[in-house]
Image (tube, helix red, strand yellow):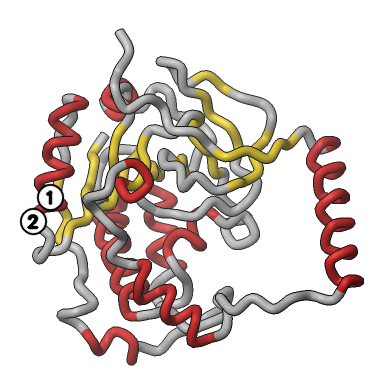
Amino acid sequence: MKCLVINLDRSPERLAHMTAEFARIGIGFERVAGIDARQHPDLVLQPQHAIHAIRPLSGSEIACLHSHRACWTIIAKGDAPYGVVFEDDMVFSGKAGALLGDTSWVPADADVVKLETFFSRTVIQRRRTSARNGFSMVRLRKGHPGAGGYLLSRQTACDFLEATAQVNIAVDDLIFDPTISAGKTVYQLVPALCAQDQFIGDGLPSLLAPERDAARTASGLMTKHRKPTTARISREAGRAARRITDFFKLRRRIVVPLAPVEAND
């Protein structure tokens, strides 16, 4: 199974980080040169067909989309049934090599498997399928941010390329928001196999977040307004109703944990 790592030419320290991470788990990888928004300021001028978005994508988000599309192209043109895409700020579980070395653990109906955790609350199906070495597979039923580590099938790579032929959506929304990827079978690995270094260490801050947050602030999406009492009561009632619905649909709300970074013998 080919592991692809997106890395900007101006970020050799991140490539060194990922080289060390893959060496630690005993797996090889292929570097894919990322599209750098700094080198392509014209990206924001591309027509955006925002079918699902509530705001225009920033230049960095468009560059990120094109970088992932480069990986999808490699997977779509390859012979392997699956490929794995990583961004260059990931930290692996000590047991990651056992899963990245083959695909026998991948469910036959899987289109996408999210390998990463963003440590944010999401909703999963209660039913679990063993994926060896203490990992399990569960269906992802709600959006889970981040596109730093995921597996996808060759056919899904082709489908995503077609779906993003025109700039229209952020990468993680396309892949991991079930309201958008409704036709795909998306699994979450539990515990997660990897997470961004910004959540674990202090050396690799997000390259995408500053511009993305600035765009959201400019659009008013990050401005918090105190809701009237009736609206707050309605919101809490809605939360209670969703919990009841999740219970009867055999779903649960969790923060996906990260498997230990150091392997346990």
Residue drawn 25% across the image and 61% down it: 70
Query: In which image quadrant can residue 229 be found?
Result: bottom right
Type of amino acid at the residue the image marks with label 2? Pro
User: Are circles 2 and 1 on residues that touch, CB within 8 Å?
Assistant: yes
Type of amino acid at the residue the image marks with label 1? Leu
Query: In which image quadrant can residue 235 be found?
Result: bottom right
CA distance separating discs 2 and 1: 5 Å
Q: Is residue 185 left or right of residue 90?
A: right
Q: Is residue 254 above or below residue 148?
A: above
Residue drawn 45% across the image and 42% down it: 117
Q: Is residue 41 above or below residue 132?
A: below
Q: Determine the secondary structure under disc 1.
A: helix
Say if residue 176 shows up in the picture.
yes
Q: Which mark is residue 15?
A: 1
Q: Determine the secondary structure under disc 2.
A: helix
Label 2 sits on residue: 12
Q: Is residue 112 left or right of residue 263?
A: right
| Residue 39: x %, y % from top left | 15, 80
| Residue 124: x %, y % from top left | 64, 39
Residue drawn 44% across the image and 81% down it: 215
Which of the pair 116/183 is nearer the observer? 116
Residue drawn 16% across the image and 40% down it: 29
| Residue 155: x %, y % from top left | 41, 49
